[in-house]
Amino acid sequence: MPAVRRDFSSSLEDFIYWDASFAIAAVIDTELYYSECSAFARRLRVESIISSSSDFTHNELAFYILKSAYVTEARIRGIRWTHLQRQRPGIVTATMPVVLARKAELESMTLHLPVTETVKDRAFELMLRYALFPTNAYHVAVALEHGVNAFATLDEDLLRMNGIFVYTCLPLP
């Protein structure tokens, strides 16, 4: 049986893990689903639902912000962002205040779940069983390791998994 799909107005589980796709949309106001995700994050807080994230969420959020800064500058210069990264490492330094502000915002809204020693093996099992990419599998593995089986996400791949709840605002296919 696939995951139980829920929209943002559905009944809530007591603990919900935020993957990077949701966290990015919840804290970056230029994202497509910002309004929906930030409103759901507020709902979780108001209803005293424990929201959680992990180092993987923080890593992907920081990477997304930094890459966006490089892509913007690269478009102006007409080059690939990866070339600009080598030429202008100072963009990281200039963008770090934004990264740190979004990190602090995420930390204020979620409980940090530590990565345990068994997460790697579990993530690889999830990749094999559900044809997940590593980033998704690691998010799920961390959450499941801590007994969390509900996810706020904009990634439909999690819907292939058994035994979890997936909260999303994505339209039905």
Image: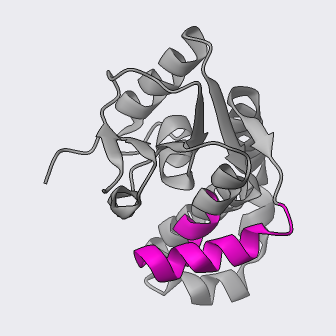
State whether residue 132 appears in this view.
no
State whether residue 127 appears in this view.
yes
Is residue 11 toward the left or the right of residue 122 in the image? left
Q: Main structural element of the magenta stretch: helix, strand or loop?
A: helix
Is residue 105 toward the left or the right of residue 11 in the image? right
Hey, which quadrant is residue 95 in on the image? bottom right
Residue 104 in the image: above or below residue 59: above
Q: Residue at x 47, y 36 (%)?
A: 29
Q: Residue at x 41, y 61 (%)?
A: 161
Is residue 123 part of the magenta span, yes or no? yes
Is residue 124 part of the magenta span, yes or no? yes
Looking at the picture, tell me which residue is in the foreground, 148 or 86.
148
Quarter of the rendering occupied by the C terminus: bottom left
Find residue 117 and report its horizontal and vertical position in percent.
86, 69
Find residue 38 and report its horizontal and vertical position in percent.
47, 28
Residue 83 in the image: above or below residue 24: below
Find residue 133 and report its horizontal and vertical position in percent.
49, 76
Residue 62 in the image: above or below residue 33: below
Find residue 39 and report its horizontal and vertical position in percent.
43, 22
Looking at the picture, tell me which residue is in the foreground, 1 or 141.
1
Please provide the residue range marked out in magenta: 116-139
